[in-house]
Amino acid sequence: MAKRRHRSKKWISWVIILILLIGAGVVCYFVYDSYFRDKSGDEVKPVENSQDKDDEKKTPEETQPEEKKEEVVEKEKVVQYDGADPNESNGITGAITYTGVSGGSLMIRMNIDQYLNGGTCTLGLRQGGSTVYSAEVGIVDSASTSTCEGFNVPVNGLSGKYNIVIYINSNGKTGEISGEVEV
């Protein structure tokens, strides 16, 4: 009696797995392609007809509908700034933006209305008509304004109400900004 050979049918399962993987790859490709496709290329192009060719021969005035022709209206020119340009004045103006005690120092910050390239700010802290403290710092320029580098006054021995006077000098222009602070 001859032995019968058993044929292995494992190759059928491998072929089915391969077909499923290829099918999954094709599905993934179509999903990916539809998700990332540039939508501007999908525009429908109009079909040319003989009337369109006749319209190309006409001047733009003839192709306009006879109902209404739109008039071009120019917008009003917008004025950006109210008042005079502060950079053209002879004096320097500004404001004290912050005064406060922090970490044992009286901090004084200010803003200058004009754009200044270099110069000095001199602080005079006065009480009862006499100067109690003075300091000098440089001017820092910004896009359209400037500022002083900032004053940090030690508060040791300071108490009460003080007048703040800041003298600004830059390229022949001068100015004075004043305010009050209580320590």
Image: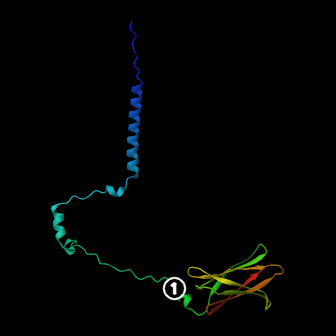
**Could you tell me which residue is drawn at 20 percent across and 60 percent down?**
48
Q: In which quadrant is the C terminus drawn?
A: bottom right
Residue 46 drawn at (x, y percent): 24, 59
Q: Is residue 73 left or right of residue 132?
A: left
Residue 99 drawn at (x, y percent): 71, 79
Res 118 quadrant in image? bottom right
**Could you tell me which residue is drawn at 44 percent across and 82 percent down?**
78
Q: Looking at this rendering, what residue extends furthest in the top direction?
A: 1
**Could you tell me which residue is drawn at 55 percent across and 91 percent down?**
88
- From the viewer's side, name the closer residue of 116 and 14: 14
Q: Amino acid at mark 1?
A: Asp
**Could you tell me which residue is drawn at 15 percent across and 62 percent down?**
50
Residue 84 drawn at (x, y percent): 53, 89
Q: Which residue is mark 1?
A: 82
Q: Looking at this rendering, what residue extends furthest in the right direction?
A: 157
Q: Is residue 102 above or below residue 141?
A: above
> Quick one: SS at disc 1?
loop
Q: Is residue 12 above or below residue 143?
A: above
Q: Residues within 10 Å of mark 1 (few under 14, many from 20)?
A: few
Residue 168 drawn at (x, y percent): 66, 89
How many numbered badges does the structure rendering display? 1
